[in-house]
Image (cartoon, helix red, strand yellow):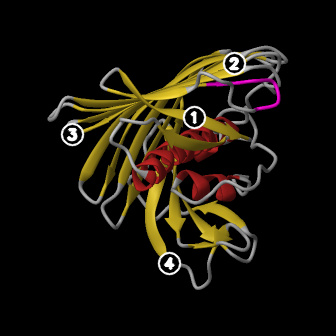
Amino acid sequence: SFSALSPHIAVIAGQPAVQRVAPVPARIPASALGATHEWHPDIFGYIANPNLTGAPADGARFLLYTINLSTYSPALPLDEIGHVDVRDLSVGDNIDIRHTIVLDAGSTMDIDMMGTLSSTTADLTTTGAITVDGVPIDFTYVIQGTQGGSFTLSIDATSGPYALDWSYSRTSGGVGPGSDRLTVSDATTGGKVEFIIDWDASYVVTVGSVIEFNDVVVADVTGTGGFIEVQPRDGSGLDDNDALLIGSGYFDAQIFNSYMISVTILALENTGRMLPSF
């Protein structure tokens, strides 16, 4: 049965991740290959419809629907909004999981996760392309870590002249000191903003954390619990409104990172796997 996939597919399609359900059996069952599955409210799950075509021969297709945000399952009456194709070409610990999402509104997402995964370690790289309202975004997302040890997350994303490079690392099973490096650049103007932030074991920003504009320090950073406060330096030309906009940009990058973590976790769980506990 693929009924456990429904909350996962909803999240990958763009809904917030708030729960993790038991994963489906590892790999896609042979009986599901080449089949298109539609939601059946009476059994609260997906069933293959032999009259529907278009699914990949080496994967399975699931129709996507508008979601009831209170249950994270398709809302009734059913409102079909697109589909997702799931392909699992992995061999043992060598991961190769591919998702293609197409929404009727014109948005698409192609992701390909490759690397190695065991019960205690992960070294996974997800590459993909998203198109939203006709605007393409290309990205690479990397997760590396050892259970109970250190881990690193990194994102490289581009859209037109804009680029985002972000890395976050944490030691001692996620409870030790960490570092945050975020660079946003515009190839058209040559402008570049860099966040250079370090955290202590209590997740408090350490002294010396700053923001640079074109390699010149323009603000100091304080904060705790993942939230930051930007304090413009005298002579930087920044005012309080600029500080709020810069802080909002950092928060938006964190949201994108959270989204990519959700995509990674759910892509793995859709094929019966999960990340180690970092």
Q: In terms of sequence position, does the residue under pointer 4 or pointer 2 come before the other?
A: 4
Give me the residue at 70% from left, 64% from top: 45
Q: Nearer the viewer, mark 1 or mark 3?
A: 1
Three-letter amino acid code at disc 3? Gly
User: How many numbered marks does the figure carry?
Assistant: 4
| Residue 16 belongs to magenta span | no
SS assignment at label 3:
loop
Give me the residue at 72% from left, 74% from top: 70
Q: Using the rendered image of the protein, determine whether residue 154 is visible from the camera's viewpoint.
A: no
Q: For residue 79, which numbered disc appears in the image?
A: 4
Q: Residue lying farthest bottom?
A: 77
Q: For residue 160, which numbered disc appears in the image?
A: 3
Depth check: give the residue in front, 195 or 74: 195
Q: In terms of sequence position, does the residue under pointer 4 or pointer 3 come before the other?
A: 4
Q: CA distance from mark 3 to mark 2?
A: 30 Å
Q: CA distance from mark 1 to mark 3?
A: 29 Å
Label 1 Cα neighbours within 10 Å, binned few <14 / some 14-19 / many ≥20 = many
| Left or right of 138, for residue 122 | right
Q: Residue lying farthest front?
A: 234
Position of 161 relative to 67 (above/below): above
Q: For residue 151, which numbered disc appears in the image?
A: 2
Q: Quadrant of residue 276?
A: top right
Rendering coords of residue 33 (x, y %): 54, 42
Q: Using the rendered image of the protein, determine whether residue 46 is visible from the camera's viewpoint.
A: yes
Q: Are marks 1 and 2 in contact (CB under 8 Å)?
A: no
Rendering coords of residue 163 (x, y %): 31, 32
Q: Nearer the viewer, mark 4 or mark 1?
A: 1
Give me the residue at 40% from left, 34% from top: 128
Q: In terms of sequence position, does the residue under pointer 1 or pointer 3 come before the other?
A: 3
Q: Residue lying farthest left?
A: 188
Q: Nearer the viewer, mark 4 or mark 3?
A: 3
